[in-house]
Amino acid sequence: MAPGPLSPLAVEDLPQVAAIEALVFPEPLSLADLRRLWDDPATSYVGYRAGDRIAAYFGFQTSGPTAHVISNATHPDFRRQGLGGRVLQEAEPLARRRGARWFLGEVRVSNTAQLRVLHRIGWVEVGGCPAFFGNGEDAIVVWRCLP
Ligand SMILES: CC(C)(COP(=O)(O)OP(=O)(O)OC[C@H]1O[C@@H](n2cnc3c(N)ncnc32)[C@H](O)[C@@H]1OP(=O)(O)O)[C@@H](O)C(=O)NCCC(=O)NCCS
């Protein structure tokens, strides 16, 4: 089934988000982490549904002009259909409505797939941060001015 349009996620979607996190991230957010984030009014989660499955999602938190990326992922069954870039782009108006002027995120230096997606959709690399991640991996700090 093809994914539908971008929509806000519901609290009932969090177990599925936690399952995708566990599948694709070296240091995934647990369901408890996600519930804590969800309870913070600064948090937004959007995604694409394919039937009752979540094909891709994106979570961010706004604080003043910054919309900070929590995480975005595409379920492995739905990769390479453009969803990873689309979810970030189509969330831009929402971040703008929530008062943000830019997205800010941290990407593992090894994450070539995400870095390629981000370059393609106009994000820029601001700099590096050594040993940013829990396992000691360096981060590339990425930024996107919201149109
Ligand atoms: C990064 C990610 C979101 C991309 O999802 P996607 O829906 O496949 O993204 P798109 O279809 O927009 O772009 C796919 C692009 O990613 C890159 N890509 C995909 N898989 C790749 C791989 N195994 N190695 C290198 N590049 C890869 C390619 O540039 C590809 O473009 P192409 O098909 O034109 O070559 C997805 O790989 C993912 O969920 N990864 C794990 C979670 C993650 O790292 N999230 C980001 C950090 S918060």
Image (cartoon, grey):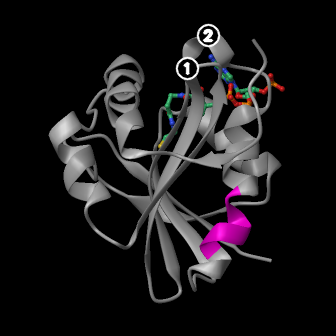
Q: Position of residue 36 (x, y in %)?
A: 19, 55
Label 2 beta carbon less than 8 Å to ligand 1: no
Instruction: Quadrant for residue 142, please give it.
Output: bottom right
Quarter in which the C terminus is drawn: bottom right
Q: What kind of residue is marked 2? A: Asp
Q: Nearer the viewer, residue 122 or 93?
A: 93
Which structural element holds mark 2? helix
Q: Is residue 42 magenta?
A: no
Q: Position of residue 50 (x, y in %)?
A: 67, 21
For the record, the magenta segment spans 91-95
Q: Is residue 115 above or below residue 99?
A: above
Crowd class of label 1 (few under 14; some 14 to 19; many from 20; radius 10 Å): some
Disc on res. 77: 2
Q: CA distance from mark 1 to mark 2?
A: 10 Å
- Kindly indicate whether the residue at mark 2 contacts the one at mark 1 (C-beta within 8 angstroms): yes
**Label 2 packing within 10 angstroms: few (<14), some (14-19), many (20+):** few
State which quadrant residue 117 falls in: top right
Q: Which mark is residue 53?
A: 1
Q: Is residue 60 visible?
A: yes
**Does residue 135 show up?**
no
Q: Position of residue 141 (x, y in %)?
A: 49, 61
Find ligand 1 in the image and state its quadrant. Answer: top right
Q: Relative to 57, does residue 145 appear above or below in the rendering?
A: below
Secondary structure under tag 1 reads: strand
Q: Quadrant of the N terminus?
A: top right
- Reply yes or no: does residue 94 show up in magenta: yes
Residue at 75% in and 55% down: 89
Q: Residue at x 65, y 80 (%)?
A: 97
> In the rendered structure, which disc, 1 or 2, sits on the residue that comes first in sequence?
1
Residue 71: x %, y % from top left: 44, 46
Disc 1 vs disc 2: which is toward the camera?
1
